[in-house]
Structure formats: structure tokens, C-alpha cells
Amino acid sequence: MSVILYFVVRRVLPPEIEEISGGKQAMAESYRALGSMTAPEKRLLAISLVLLGLWATENKLHSLDTASSTIAGVALMLLPGIGVMTWKQTQKLIPWGTVIVFAVGISLGTGCSIPRRHSGFPVPWCRLSSLIRCRPLPFSPCCRLS
């Protein structure tokens, strides 16, 4: 399908310039300027390939879920001696606010999609909704899904 899509896009949106003069030489110079891979880059590549393999073969060759394998990969990347980066570098480079917002959103979505009839979390919500004299929201965890 990707091969067909390539030809369709080339036909519908033809490029304005077929070749950029000096483009191959500029790319070759940029590639040479990168130099060879360092040891941490090689370890990162190996860990990434292992993670991709684990994600692609989940429930086919092993029972590890993607979250567990990802946490193991990140822990491996942060280990002293093996790791690719230190925790201090990680704290500076990762936008933790975004990570927390995604984690809260996923947690709430999972919590609201799983029917929970007698757990501790939905009870205050159900009590609050009955105090206001309105029905609970259809996506709230206290709703009985049959």
C-alpha cells in the first residue's frame, strides 16, 4: 500500500524541483561530520531494537506487556555503567508536566472504562452525585455497565 501511495502522492502533488544542486555533496559532508557512533549511542540503539522487538511480538512470543517492557528499557537506560544518560540529565531534558498530564489522562480513561461496582473510588462520586440530585455521568466509574 505504501508503494502505491508514493506514486499517488507524486502524481497529485508533483515536486516543484526535481533535484537540488549540491544536495548529495551537502548530505555526504553532514554524514561525515557526524562521525562514528559513540558507545552510548550504540547501547541506545541496541536497547531500542530490543524494545521494538518486544513490542512487536507481545502476546505472540512472550507475555510481557508494552508498559513493563518500556519501564525495563528505561531502567536499563538509566543504569550506571550500562545506561545512556544519568537521572540528572533526564530531569533537565524531559518535560515532566506533559508526562504527568498524559499519565493522569490515561489513568482516568482506564478508570472510567472499567466497570467497578463496589470499589472505594466510585463511592464518593456516587454520593456526591446523589447529593446534587442528578444522575451520575454515563462515563463515571460508579455507573453499572451491563
Image (cartoon, rainbow, N blue to C red):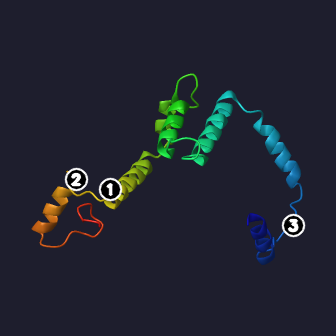
Distance Cα–Cα, label 3 vs label 2: 61 Å
Q: Which mark is residue 121?
A: 2
- Horizontal side of 128 relative to 2 (left or right) equals left
- The C terminus appears in which quarter of the rendering? bottom left
Q: Nearer the viewer, residue 14 or 103?
A: 103
Indicate which label's residue lies in the foreground, 3 or 2: 2
Q: Amino acid at mark 2?
A: Phe
The CA span between labels 1 and 2 is: 9 Å
Q: Position of residue 41 (x, y in %)?
A: 67, 34
The tag on residue 47 is none
Q: Secondary structure at mark 1?
A: helix
Tag count: 3
Q: Earlier in the sequence, mark 3 or mark 2?
A: 3
Q: Which residue is mark 3?
A: 18
What residue is drawn where x is 35% and y is 61%? 113
Which residue, given by chain and number where applicable, does mark 1 sit on?
111
**Which image quadrant for residue 145?**
bottom left
Name above or below for residue 90 compared with residue 129.
above
Three-letter residue code for mark 3: Glu
The mark nearer the N terminus, 3 or 1, is 3
Q: Residue at x 64, y 31 (%)?
A: 43
> Which residue is found at the position 70% from the left and 30% from the top?
38
Amino acid type indicated by mark 1: Gly
Could you say where residue 14 lies in the image, as x and y percent from the top left? 81, 74
Q: Residues within 10 Å of mark 2 (few under 14, many from 20)?
A: few
Q: Is residue 116 left or right of residue 6?
A: left
State yes or no: discs 1 and 2 in contact (Cβ < 8 Å): yes
Residue at the left extreme of this rendering? 131
Tag 3: Cα neighbours inside 10 Å, few (<14), some, or many (≥20)? few
**From the image, which quarter does the N terminus lie in?**
bottom right
Q: Position of residue 49 (x, y in %)?
A: 65, 40
